[in-house]
Amino acid sequence: KKLGIVGAGNVGATLALFAVNSGLADVVLYDIVEGMPQGKALDILQNTAVIGIKANISGTNNLDDLAGSDIVVITAGLARKPGMRRKDLLMANAEIVGNIVNKLAPICPDTNYIVVTNPMDVMAYVTMVISGTKRQKVLGMGGILDSSRFKTFISMELGVSPKDIETTVLGGHGLYMVPLVRFTTVKGIPLSKWLPQDKIESLVQRTREGGAEIVSLLKTGSAYYAPAQSTFEMVKAILLDEKRILPCSVYLDGEYGAKDVFNGVPVVLGKQGLEKIVELELTEEEKQAFENSTEEVKNMIKILKEEGRI
Ligand code: NAI
């Protein structure tokens, strides 16, 4: 199997390392910066010699080398800087992602796109429109990362393994994300039995601001280990046809009451990409939170349409 990674920065290169070491795919790592993807690819290849596996990875500045990829992961773009809002990234990254997808669409007609570049839900929309591919083939990564952050904070609070925690986060990958406390359990027991309401609320809030917390600690750049691992989880589910239920951003056509927008919902991931959208019954409050989240994404899509970008 062939995995094309667009953008060999922090997320892209870390994903390349995870993918190569898993032995699941040959990786082609692309970036606009000359020499950089080639250098990182060689470094990653040498790591396989240490652990003793035979793998293929190459770096390139030519998008044609991604032709025929089974999966293309898009991480190219600008990352959020301290104080920078997701919206500020919108115009710049829409142009970068739009140009790349425009070139890839004819040479990767059957590929599954996984979009990471922020604002991710909007970039996934750009990818679907520009590629003209069907909605099953375009997925945005956000919900797995947001869920992992919520699980981490619960695990730190309770001193239990995150493996025993089940949760899902709906909605856009931004301040309007909707961590579903009602569907959060520890060893099958609802979180509300483990922690008082105000504690749960503070963990939800920390999850919402999980990306910003890391940005402000790092001073330069944003999180990438957990984002790369989350993306790899999606790559694996598709390549191994796992049929796992994972929260991903997908094109909604009436599901969850939303239309013509990308937003995070639980989906079944398998070799076809998005194989099924799992519809949870939401309370009025959760529905409202989800709607706020789709509104945020729709507003950004509207700006791009007004500017003639899509
Ligand atoms: P980074 O700055 O380390 O890497 C971005 C790479 O894109 C750079 O190597 C840059 O040279 C490359 N690039 C820029 N323009 C390009 C073009 N036209 N063609 C090819 N490559 C180009 O950033 P990082 O940390 O890897 O993040 C990448 C993106 O992913 C950002 O937009 C970031 O906000 C987003 N992100 C999204 C997450 C999510 O949950 N959806 C989580 C983490 C990051």
Image (cartoon, rainbow, N blue to C red):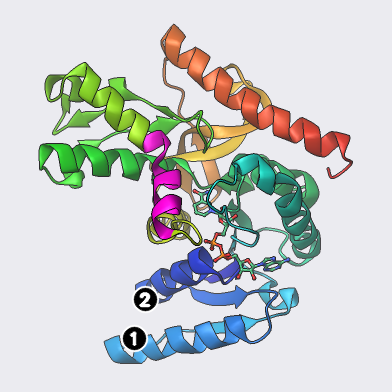
Q: Amino acid at mark 2?
A: Asn
Q: How far across and down, in percent of the image, does residue 287 sit?
A: 49, 14
Dividing the image into 4 quarters, which one contains the C terminus?
Answer: top right
* 181 in relation to 111, above or below: above
> Within the magenta stretch, is there residue 295?
no
**Residue drawn at point x = 74 percent, y = 76 percent:** 64
Above or below 122: residue 27 = below
Residue count near mark 1 (Cα–Cα under 10 Å), binned few <14, some 14–19, many ≥20? some
Of mark 2 and mark 1, the one earlier in the sequence is: 2
Query: Magenta residues, as a range?
Result: 207-218
Image x and y of residue 175, in percent: 50, 32
Which residue matches tag 1? 53
Q: Which residue position is annotated with label 2?
A: 21
User: In the rendered structure, are the residues bearing label 2 and label 1 in contact, judged by CB atoms less than 8 Å apart?
Assistant: yes
Marks 2 and 1, how far apart in space?
8 Å
The response on whether ligand 1 sits within 8 Å of label 1 is no
Q: Is residue 211 magenta?
A: yes
28 or 39: nearer the eye?
Answer: 39
Is residue 277 rendered to the left or right of residue 202?
A: right
> Which image quarter has ligand 1?
bottom right
Note whether residue 256 is visible: no
Report which quarter residue 52 is drawn in: bottom left
Q: Quadrant of the rendered structure where residue 81 is? A: bottom right
Q: What residue lies at 42% left-to-right and 74% top-to-bottom?
A: 17
Which residue type does callout 1 highlight?
Answer: Ile
Return the residue nearer the eye: 59 or 253.
Answer: 59
The image's mark for residue 103 is none
Q: Position of residue 270 (x, y in %)?
A: 47, 49
Q: Secondary structure at mark 2?
A: helix
